[in-house]
Amino acid sequence: MAKANETETRWWGWGDINKTYPVEERPGYIPFLAEKLDIKVERLRAPDPKLEDLTLRDSRLKEKALKTLAGIVGDENISTSKRDRVYHAIGKSYRDIIRARAGEIPSPPDAVIFPGTEEEVVQIMKFAEAESLAIVPFCGGSSVVGGVEPLEKKGLSGSLTVDLRRMDRVLRVDPESLTARFEAGIWGPQLEEELAKRSLYMGHAPESFLFSGLGGWIASRSAGRQSTGYGKIEEMLEAVRIVTPRGVIDTLDVPASATGPDLDQIICGSEGTLGIITQATMKVRPLPEVYDYRGLLFKEFEGGVQAVREMMQSGVIPETIRISDPEESSLAMVVRKPSSNPKKEKGIQAALKVLDIFGYSFVTGAFAVLGCEGKEAEATERMKRVSAICRKNGAVPLGKSTGLEWYHGRYDHPYLRDIMMGWGVMVDTLETATTWDNIMNLYRNGKRAIRDALADYDSKAIVTCHLSHSYRTGSSLYFIFMGKIAKGREIEQWEHLKKKASDAILDSGGTITHHHGVGYEHAPWFEREYGPQGMEALRALKQALDPAGIMNPGKLGL
């Protein structure tokens, strides 16, 4: 089953099967990895695994059950094919990719169903509850925390993945109120294309934007690259409709209300454990006239952090402000593609030498991307004001070309992860958030924990960090780390690092996740963060809406 405008995507890695990361155009990257990690990097790319070589557990659904489900959605909209079951069996976390490449798919769904209407969702849910089948809601499948993996649960006889990609209609657009209502299966590119036809824009663009959709964003409390200016998905949410095993919840489309606890926010972040989100009304805005993205270089990371805090607390807020620490800044320079114009490249290198004379270096400084979107005059004035704050805190401008290079390549880096794993390099991410007074403490402790965990497996480390989603009271921290894969102990090594780093994050006052979600990979720390009384309340809500426990079992610790 394929979406009409969908290219084939990898089941063993990230993204479009016809796309990869052009490492060959970055000649300094492999020598950099080899030196920093003290490993020999083979330039040959690992071969893609073959679906036909994979052994998969047979579907446990009887013919009668399959016929009943086909009667609900149509024969062409239910699949037990190997590819569909494998594609829907795991997400895109490091552990997922390691297992996929090893041919280990422990719990594939017994069938994948593609409903086209909410009534079909209702009927599927009734059938699943009667037959004791788990339901895993699926939008794009880009979860990096185990959020879409069907898990075994005592008392359930099998699992169904419900893929919403056919439910992708624009239901209503209200340019006067600046809201738009969509079915939850609509993917990011289609959503923005439909809004652009009406000169509107939502502006939610996570790294997974090309391969994820509205229902998944809401279910996991997603954040886009422009969330500093536009807010996370929960701030864009106006109203939502969800089908639960005990009926439909449809919240009122109003800008604000005091009628008890906010159901929108209870549903947002529920990760499919309460039901299937089928529709949502979202706040939108006029299509920007300009997208002004620029690069800057701070003398030091703390100067960049201070600049972001000043912006947020003075109310002069860009859509995007990303500040990289020295290790990430130096990596950005290594990964950059040299200009094809020798004269231009010579000029860039000369400019870097001049900057170094004045104490500005990608090795010791902090590279930043600054972006303002909107009406030309307003965005231009805002860019002047935020640039002034940056200069006051020790930044020099690098120009628009640097910012636009980041902007146009912002969805490409997950492809590089897959290549590096084939070279024997462990590469993954961790993200958190804390208040401004605790940012540098959490930053230092997080990096130290990751380095120590890699050293425990005899690996040197590259550990980078950036701020990319900021608020009046604090900011996120996004760690990217690389090390030598412990061959034969890949999952053990990853679990050790995950525990050590996650413990350090909570011990240092950070949240276990800012936007990746909980799934089952973060569940132990989520329970610690939520507290026993919070978990008791969450379990009571689950029992009220899903008493048979069929909805995405094992996620959120439920």
Image: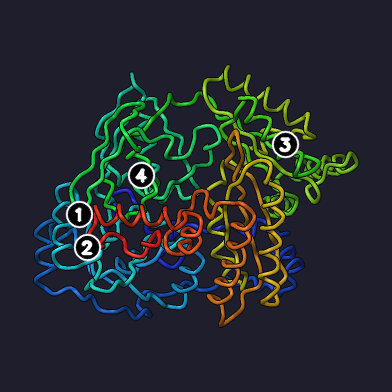
Residue where numbered disc 3 is placed: 306
Residue where numbered disc 4 is placed: 266
504 or 48, which is in the foreground? 504
Vertical position of residue 191 compared to residue 383: above or below: below
Examine the image and state in which quarter residue 471 appears.
Answer: top right
Q: Is residue 441 left or right of residue 191?
A: right
First in sequence, mark 4 or 2: give its number: 4
* The furthest residue to the front: 533
Q: Is residue 324 left or right of residue 87?
A: right
Vertical position of residue 433 compared to residue 316: above or below: below
Q: Are marks 2 and 1 in contact (CB under 8 Å)?
A: yes
First in sequence, mark 4 or 3: give its number: 4
Q: Are marks 1 and 4 in contact (CB under 8 Å)?
A: no
Could you tell me which secondary element the residue under label 3 belongs to? Answer: helix
Quote the CA–CA distance across marks 4 and 3.
Answer: 33 Å
Examine the image and state in which quarter residue 179 appears.
Answer: top left
Disc number lying in front (2 or 3):
2
Residue where numbered disc 2 is placed: 548
First in sequence, mark 2 or 1: give its number: 1
Query: Crowding at label 3, few (<14), some or many (≥20) Cα neighbours within 10 Å?
Result: some
19 or 486, which is in the foreground? 486
Quote the CA–CA distance across marks 2 and 3.
Answer: 50 Å
Could you tell me which secondary element the residue under label 4 belongs to? Answer: helix
* The furthest residue to the right: 357
Could you tell me which secondary element the residue under label 2 belongs to? Answer: loop
Going by the numbered disc 2, the residue's amino acid type is: Ala
Q: Residue at x 67, y 50 (%)?
A: 337
Going by the numbered disc 1, the residue's amino acid type is: Pro
Could you tell me which secondary element the residue under label 1 belongs to? Answer: loop
Quote the CA–CA distance across marks 1 and 3.
Answer: 48 Å
536 or 340, which is in the foreground? 536
